[in-house]
Amino acid sequence: MITRKINTVKRKLHDKRIAPANSTVIGDNFWRLEEFHTYTILTKEHGKKVIYKCAATEKSKPFIKSIAKKEKLNAEYLKGRFDVLCGLLEKDQIKYEYLTYPSLKDEIIFYMRQGCYNRANDLVEKYVDKIRSLKTIKTTPTEFIKKFVSSAVTHLPKVDCLARGLLDLTPDNILIDGDRWIALDNEWSFDFPMPVMFVIFRAIQTLAVVSQSDIRKSASKANPVIGILAGRLRTYYIPVLWMKHVTYYDVNLCRTFKWEQGFQQYVTGSTHMKISRVRKNPWIRTRFLL
């Protein structure tokens, strides 16, 4: 059933009415709810490559239009820390300049593969410092909880929150051009406060999944790793030096993980995740058998 649905979506996206003959579909999020379903194409105009983010359904057209508005607001909020790649709204799609810079995620993985774990860890530290240096407010993020968790907030303490909720300000959505850090993909940004820890947790969780083999290979006595996240058949390790960034605030990891599950349900209608829980008794390792 799922495979048939994926193939149907791919056929539709390669239909000439949606993706022109001289373009390539480079991204599609068929697993989302219909109102959030978009696809991305790469094409050429006047000899230059450009990117289009497009509404895939009638219901997702308002979502596309909202992204263009968010980008301008985020550019102002992030000024001095990050540049924002803003697109041009054209009916039901947004046109972007095509940039070839490496992502922060790619740079971190590159240094781990080179055995330069110190440089990889320094990049994570720099990322966290930039996030924490944004305008924050100490408050109980009531609107955030109601939107993604739908549970009582009476026992949640006041925590440091970003003044604008930028959920996807993660290393895979940041390009590096020398000293410029360019933020992409402003789909999941909101105008209410959001816990700083949650944004950092999502960043480190994403890195743990996409670079797990490299994290394991980089493990050593000088760079120990800890198995804090668990999937159905796998434990996900992160460097111990990264761990301090997700335990800094007054919210435990189990609650933070439930927030992530709530967000996934908001986007997809399901809580199914690669990572299914936070380990109660994580252990530290300094090497893995090949």
Image (cartoon, rainbow, N blue to C red):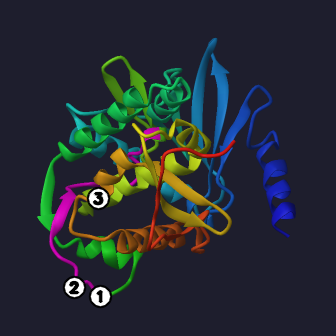
Label pair 2/1, CB-CB below 8 angstroms: yes
Inspect the image, locate mark 2, and give the three-letter code of the amino acid beneath it: His
Which residue position holds label 2?
155
Inspect the image, locate mark 1, and give the three-letter code of the amino acid beneath it: Ala
Label pair 2/3, CB-CB below 8 angstroms: no
Q: Quadrant of residue 147?
A: bottom left
Residue at 46% from the left image edge and 32% from the top image edge = 108
How far separated are the C-alphas under marks 1 and 3?
A: 19 Å
Magenta highlight range: 152-171
Q: Does residue 150 appear to the left or right of 19 in the view shown?
A: left
Residue at 29% from the left image edge and 51% from the top image edge = 245
Front residue (pair 77, 66)? 77
Q: Assess whether residue 66 is covered by the magenta stretch.
A: no
Which residue position holds label 1?
152
Front residue (pair 161, 99)? 161
The picture places residue 186, in percent across and down from the top left corner, at 42, 46
Q: Earlier in the sequence, mark 1 or mark 3?
A: 1
Please identify the quadrant where the N terminus is shown. Answer: bottom right
The answer to whether residue 187 is visible is: no
Inspect the image, locate mark 3, and give the three-letter code of the amino acid beneath it: Met
Which residue position holds label 3?
197
Residue at 28% from the left image edge and 34% from the top image edge = 126
Please identify the quadrant where the C terminus is shown. Answer: top right
Q: Does residue 17 appear to the left or right of 234 in the view shown?
A: right
Q: Secondary structure at mark 3?
A: helix
Q: Earlier in the sequence, mark 2 or mark 3?
A: 2
How far separated are the C-alphas under marks 2 and 3?
A: 17 Å
Classify 269 as above or below 108. Answer: below
Q: Secondary structure at mark 1?
A: loop
Q: Nearer the viewer, mark 2 or mark 1?
A: 2
